[in-house]
Amino acid sequence: MGKKDRTTIVNNINELNLEIDYDKLAEAIVKAQKKSEEKPVSNNKIGFWKAVWLIIINKEEKTGTRTAALLASVMGKLFNGIALIGVLLCIGFICAAIFGLDWTGSASTIILQAVALIIMVVTAASLSLIFRGMANEINQENDRNYIMNLFFGLASLASLIVALVALFKEMG
C-alpha cells in the first residue's frame, strides 16, 4: 500500500469553523422567500361536472388538486345558496314590514316592530354579503391545504349543530 492509498484522519479540531454567519443565513432565507413568491401559480380550475367525471373515470392528475377544486366548487355553491337565502329573507322581512305590521296600533308598538324588522333586514343583508364574499374567495383560492381545512372545519361545525339539535330534542 502506497502513501496515496491510505486515508488520513484529522485529529486537530481547531481547524474546523463552527461559527454561524447569521447575516448570510438571513439573506438566504429572504432570497428563498422571494423565489417562492415568484413561482407562478397554476390555476387549473375545471368545472364541477367535469371534475366529477374525471374522478369517476379515474384519470390521473399530477398536481393532486382535483379534489380540492371539487370541494371548493361545492363550498362556493353552498355559500352562494346561503347568500341567496339571506336575500330572500331580506325581501321577506321587507314584505312583512309593509304588509304584516299592525299599523292601527299605538305608535310605540309600530316603532318597536319597525325597528325589529329593520335590524333583521340589516342582519340578513350583512350575512348574505359575507357569505357571497366567502363564496367568491373560495372559488379564487388555489391553496389545497386551505380548502381541505376549510371543508373539514365546516363538516365539524355541521356535526356540532346536529349533535346540539339531537341533545336539545332529547331534553325537550
Image (cartoon, rainbow, N blue to C red):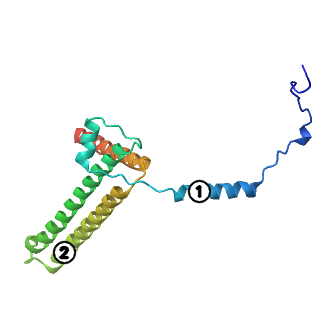
Given residues 60 and 49, the one toward you in this image is 60
Residue 105's place in the image compared with 89, above or below, is below
Tag 1: residue type? Gln
Disc nearer the start of the sequence (2/1): 1
Q: Position of residue 152 (x, y in %)?
A: 37, 44
- Distance from Cα at disc 2 to Cα at disc 1: 55 Å
Looking at the rendered structure, which numbered label has been put on residue 83?
A: none
Residue nearest the observer in this picture, 129 or 23: 23
- Pointer 2: residues within 10 angstroms few (<14), some, or many (20+)? some
Q: Can you say whether 11 is above or below 26 in the image?
A: above
**Residue at which label 2 appears:** 114
| Quadrant location of the N terminus in the rendered image | top right
**Residue visible at 10% across and 74% down in the picture:** 98
Looking at the image, can residue 165 be seen? no
Q: Is residue 103 visible?
A: yes
94 left or right of 21?
left
Q: Position of residue 73 (x, y in %)?
A: 29, 51
Q: Nearer the viewer, residue 61 or 73?
A: 61
Residue 110 in the image: above or below residue 138: below
Identify the residue at image location x=12%, y=69%. Answer: 96
Quadrant in which residue 165 is drawn: top left
The answer to whether residue 155 is left or right of residue 116 is right
Q: Which quarter of the figure has residue 94?
A: bottom left
In x, y percent, where is residue 40? 47, 57
* Residue bearing mark 1: 33
Type of residue at label 2? Ala
Q: Residue at x 65, y 55 (%)?
A: 29
- Residue 17, x across and y down, in percent: 85, 45
| Residue found farthest to the top | 1
Q: Secondary structure at mark 2?
A: helix
Quadrant where the C terminus lies?
top left
Give the residue at x 22% y 62%.
86
